[in-house]
Image (cartoon, grey):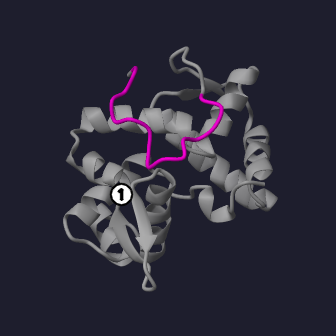
């Protein structure tokens, strides 16, 4: 299992995750401040959303005090307009785990039901069944938010462009900010 449980997102609203870089760019430094900036989030959710921003490559947590910092991609993302951010988020789904593995599974067959999505996550990280079910709902919501997947007849189906899915995640900060497709 290449991932830890913290590497599987639990922040349900992708566009709120996308606001984390803006929060940091505007001087918010703690997860409580980030939760307040996003709005209508309790302090615990500030952790979830900050962790999700880390999964996407927007932030790092450095130093002995765990200071949150924007990555170079996070800085560029915060300066992007909503259309550019949408393109970047869509592209990230193909590169970042666990979304990449779920996309591979969706394209390999006739979609996937909730149990199959949870099983994909459990192959990636040591998740209990109930946790895998909840986190699979998050990943599915993210893929739907960027129009790469849609629910039909109780199954999540791929509905994005017919592009190849990279075999592995790049080992640098993030994929290019220049999308090859929209």
Report the quarter where the C terminus lies: top left
Is residue 110 visible in the rendered image? The answer is: yes
Overall secondary structure of the magenta section: loop
The spot of residue 84 in percent (x, y) is 28, 34
| Rendering coords of residue 43 (x, y %) | 42, 76
Report the side of 145 relative to 134 (left or right): left
Q: Going by the picture, which residue comes out furthest to the top?
A: 162
- As drawn, 15 above or below 102: below
Q: Residue at x 63, y 31 (%)?
A: 103
| Position of 127 relative to 174 (above/below) | below
Q: Position of residue 11 (x, y in %)?
A: 50, 57
Residue positioned 23% across, 42% down in the render = 80
Residue drawn 47% across and 38% down?
92
Q: Secondary structure at mark 1?
A: loop
Specify the farthest residue to the bottom: 65
Quadrant location, the N terminus:
bottom right
Nearest to the observer: residue 24 or residue 37: 24
In the rendered image, residue 12, in percent from the top left (x then y), is placed at 51, 53
Per the rendered image, the range of residues in magenta is 166-181
Image position of 39 with respect to 111: above or below: below
The question of residue 178 being in magenta is answered with yes
Residue 87 lies in quadrant: top left
In magenta stretch: residue 50: no
Residue 155: tell me if it is visible: no
Residue that carries the numbered disc 1 in the rendered image: 71
Q: Quadrant of residue 113?
A: top right
Task: Please rate how many residues cluster around mark 1, counting C-alpha atoms within 10 Å: few if below 14, some from 14 to 19, many from 20.
Answer: some
Give the total number of marks visible in the rendering: 1
């Amino acid at each position: 299992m290449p991932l830890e449980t913290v590497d599987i997102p639990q922040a349900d609203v992708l566009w709120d995750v996308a606001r984390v870089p803006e929060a940091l760019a505007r001087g918010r430094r703690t997860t409580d401040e980030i939760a307040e900036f996003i709005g209508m989030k309790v302090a615990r959710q500030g952790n979830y959303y900050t962790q999700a921003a880390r999964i996407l490559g927007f932030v790092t947590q450095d130093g002995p005090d765990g200071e949150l910092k924007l990555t170079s991609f996070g800085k560029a993302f915060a300066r992007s307009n909503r259309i550019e951010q949408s393109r970047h988020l869509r592209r990230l789904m193909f590169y970042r785990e666990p979304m990449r593995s779920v996309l591979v599974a969706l394209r390999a067959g006739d979609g996937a039901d909730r149990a199959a999505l949870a099983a994909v996550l459990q192959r990636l990280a040591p998740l209990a069944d109930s946790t895998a079910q909840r986190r699979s709902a998050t990943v599915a919501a993210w893929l739907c938010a960027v129009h790469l997947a849609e629910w039909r007849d109780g199954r999540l189906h791929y509905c994005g462009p017919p592009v190849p899915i990279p075999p592995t995640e790049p080992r640098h900060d993030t994929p290019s900010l220049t999308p090859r497709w929209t």
